[in-house]
Amino acid sequence: MSDSATNLEELKKLAPPVELQRAPVVEGNQGLGWLTDKLSVFAEGKTPKWWLALFLPAAFAGTVIFPICLFYQISVGVGAWGNNHPVMWGLDIVNFIWWVGVAHAGTLISALLFLTKQHWRTTIGRMAEAMTVFSVMMAGLYPAIHTGRPWFDWFMFPVPNSNALWPQFKSPLMWDVFAVNTYLVVSSLFWFMGMIPDFAVFRDRSTTRVRKAIFSFLAMGWTGSARQWHHYEKAYMVLCGLCTLLVFTVSSIVGLDFCTSQIAGWHATIFPLYFVIGAVFCGFGMMLVILIPLRKWCGLENVITMSHMDKVAKLALVAGLIIDYIYAMEFFIAWYSGDTYERWVFGHRIFGHTYIVLGWMLIGINVGVTQLLWFKKIRSNLLALFIIGVLINIGMWTERFVIVVGSLYQEFLPANWGKYMPTMWDIGLYIGTLGAFFMLYLLFVKFLPMIAISEVKGVMPAGDPHHPLGGAKKEDRA
Amino acid sequence: MSEKTIPSSKPYGLMAEFDTPGDLLRAAEKVRDAGYNRWDVFTPFPVHGMDKVMGLKNSLVGWVSLAGGAFMFLNVAFLIWFSNAFEYPLMVGGKPMFSAPMTFVPAYIMLIMGAAVGALIGMLGLNQLPRLHHPLLDHKRFALVSRDKFVMVIGAMDEKFCVTGTKELLESIGGANVEIVEDKE
């Protein structure tokens, strides 16, 4: 012990000055055992009141409002929604893109930041992945019911059938089917595989027979041997690489749905990039909304530190700035192209009449509010960050509305013009998906390992065999 | 399966505990140098440098994943040719019935799906998971591995294994609570 203590003192002398040192991933760390308790105690303890207070309304929306809206819409048809000529894509597609967007930041945090060896991601990666899985579920639902006759949805899959029907693979809408399904499967696999070692932690800590049986089943006999970790790490890295590809693919394909059409306001080559960055930006907003309350209520302030929040906010700022650049480019190209219809659509986004409020909300939030994240004072104020997170989500939702509806309601022939107003079924379904999302998320937080316990341990000084706290001796370093 | 009717128990190996990954890494070097082959370490997280000490070669998971990805990519490309150009030729916008660019996106997306499923199956298969029983999981102190203990097990199948000799070795390299693990089957 004294040996490692003197060793530590020497290491401190060699360390760079305080302002150049990296913020610790876990503050007030007291060893690996302490960390295990800290990270698993919430899932094992009594259900707190705040959890019930959030869960019950979410579950009401997710299990009552949601099925009622679905049932009515499916039995009556798409006419229950406000979609009508010329606005055939309404809230359903707006919400689809919005949910896919929320998913993207989760994958970006857990996969791309792993590949770039950002140790701080370990504490928030799992929560980000869960956000991805649940929001892709919500996203996938919208196009499925927007087909109008969801019982024929199997036509979209290449299943041999007696009608000799095959999907038309030249259409980006068809690619979407594959992209969203792949996204759901791959992000779920990634999420599940990451949890296997943590299921083993829960299994070994369980005190009741039922708990032990459930987590033994989920851990599948994981022992944590070096050979297992060896294959596991490889598989994890491969999955991270694949998920990173998906971050850039899925939203690009959603963007292609738009830009391969002829509609002014959609027909732009910037769309795939636009949608990817928009998705990531929106997802970071959602990450702020989820992390800020949970870190406090679950007692995880030492683990999801202010430095983590600062980094998420900075990433949101980066994504926001790219989005701002793309807005500027969109308007510039619309003007520069000299195309009358393009100019008309973009002019009407901010100087029109019907959806002008949304147009200015989009600019006010995504261009204006985002700039607040430049200031350290704002980034270290959790309430401000939470509000900015909510606003980013609203802003990005508005953006999708402006793109989808704003481009459709005044198309080429003035005789075709019309307006779009969502009906209560549109809004009810949105509330239902929000409820279902938060219900699933709260269940995840309460019952599953919400922080990647083994990953966090691996990046602790005590987990590094070449650090004095990890048992390294002087002769090892030399 | 005849063992099942007569409950028997044979030694599975000797288990020793260590407090830090650094201690474990040094111990592993010594066990390797002593000439043991059938031993493994059990840790709460992957310990860096252990692969090298144990002489583990590059994991095959990457190849399984590649196989899954390539399989799906080629299959989907074939499917698109078969369905849109061969079985029911479909003319869309005057474009060719079959061309590489239009095949690429769905085939690439399904490549990701195939590779991801391959990676998970490869990982589980190579680790022989899921498994219903493991002698170590019956051992009480082994539960600490997922918490903060680092355990080394030298298997009884090892040619050099001898209860007293191996125990002495494990104790001499700093292992605590050296105990025999029984395989109850």
Image (cartoon, rainbow, N blue to C red):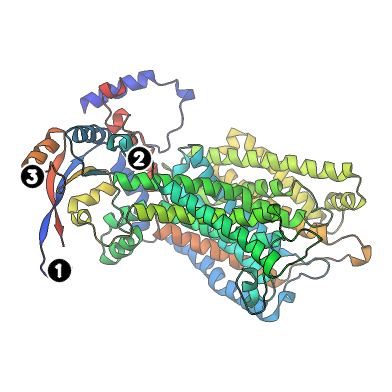
Q: In the rendered structure, which amino acid carries the disc numbered 3?
A: Val
| Vertical relation: A73 (above or below) A333 | below
Q: Residue at x 46, y 40 (%)?
A: A305
Q: Are marks 2 and 3 on the same chain?
A: yes
Report in which chain the residue with disc 3 lies: B
State which chain disc 2 sits on. B
- Quarter of the figure that contains the C terminus of chain A: top left
Binning the other alpha carbons within 10 Å of mark 2 as few (below 14), some (14 to 19) or many (20 upward) gives: few
* Viewer-nearest residue: B77 or A57: B77
Q: In this rendering, which labeled residue sits more in front, label 2 or label 3?
A: 2
Left or right of A107 on screen, residue A44: left
Cβ–Cβ below 8 Å for labels 2 and 3?
no
- Compare marks 2 and 3 and give the one earlier in the sequence: 2
The residue carrying mark 3 is: B163
Marks 1 and 3, how far apart at CA: 27 Å
Q: Position of residue B50 (x, y in %)?
A: 31, 37
Q: Residues within 10 Å of mark 1 (few under 14, many from 20)?
A: few
Residue under pointer 2 = B57
